[in-house]
Amino acid sequence: DTAVSQTPKYLVTQMGNDKSIKCEQNLGHDTMYWYKQDSKKFLKIMFSYNNKELIINETVPNRFSPKSPDKAHLNLHINSLELGDSAVYFCASSQEPRITEAFFGQGTRLTVV
Amino acid sequence: GNSVTQMEGPVTLSEEAFLTINCTYTATGYPSLFWYVQYPGEGLQLLLKATKADDKGSNKGFEATYRKETTSFHLEKGSVQVSDSAVYFCALSVGTGNQFYFGTGTSLTVIP
């Protein structure tokens, strides 16, 4: 039973399209995150939600819009995709960031052509 | 602010060699410290953690000690294996801010 699952695992799409990545966690955690990992493996926080409320919204183009219908789900919608959006996107969750670790999904490799 | 600095890679070692990956941090407050490992094509997995000064985290032969005086959390392993080839991330979290701060990652390749 996967703790943090995200779909799809691979996503290839053309520039200008709109796409969504879904994330679900069955750990009962209150906090969920989206990270972007570039080709050099650098991880950048994009968003953080706590109990469905947006906590962190880093400098991300407003083409990226997270949606949290309940605390177990955090989806990422991307409008008007650009070549530079190609990356691996990771969803993660944690209960008590000060003490407990974050659990990561397997990642979604997005390729914009 | 909060940040993590870890040694740049890539690192290439022969099997059974000793491994050290340096990690230093700056933090407001008292952070918890983590090492994550990312195998090719996979997500990040927790390798070990330490939540207060002088704690030692250990797992799978890897160790790291939370050194407050030097603000460091260096990862060590006495004898690496080919299966340890992966990218290693040092990270911290603090109570405020509700997020994890990651280093840039260090790629390790172990050759037979």
Image (cartoon, coloured by chain):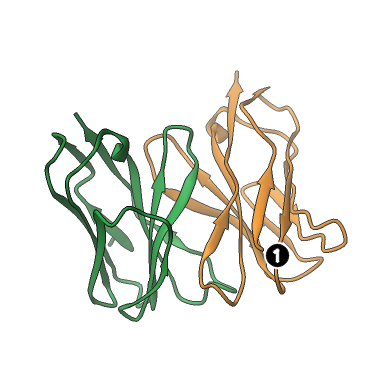
Chain colours: A green, B orange
Quadrant of res A67: bottom left
Q: Residue furthest right?
A: B69
Task: Determine whether, in the image, residue A99 is placed left or right of residue B55.
Answer: left
Give the vertical position of A54 relative to A111 (above or below): below
Quadrant of res B20: top right
Q: How many marks?
A: 1
The residue at the point 71 percent across, 51 percent down is B63
Q: Residue A33 location in percent, x, y?
A: 39, 63
The residue at the point 66 percent across, 52 percent down is B4
Chain at tag 1: B
* Viewer-proximal residue among A68 and A94: A68
* Viewer-proximal residue among B59 and A110: A110
Quadrant of res A52: bottom left
Task: Determine whether, in the image, residue A40 is placed left or right of residue B80.
Answer: left
Crowd tier of the residue under label 1, counting other residues whose Cα lies within 10 Å: few below 14, some 14–19, many 20 or above: some
Task: Determine whether, in the image, residue B79 is placed left or right of residue A62.
Answer: right
Give the vertical position of B18 relative to A23 (above or below): above
Give the vertical position of B37 relative to A34 (above or below): above
Q: Residue B77 location in percent, x, y?
A: 72, 41
Q: Quadrant of the C terminus of chain B?
A: top right
Q: Secondary structure at mark 1?
A: loop
Q: Quadrant of the N terminus of chain B?
A: bottom right
Residue that mark 1 sits on: B27
* Viewer-proximal residue among A63 and A106: A63
Q: Residue B103 location in percent, x, y?
A: 60, 47
Q: Residue furthest top?
A: B112
The residue at the point 48 percent across, 52 percent down is B45
Q: Residue B110 location in percent, x, y?
A: 60, 25
The residue at the point 51 percent across, 77 percent down is A96
Residue type pointed to by label 1 = Ala
Task: Determine whether, in the image, residue B85 is placed left or right of residue A19.
Answer: right
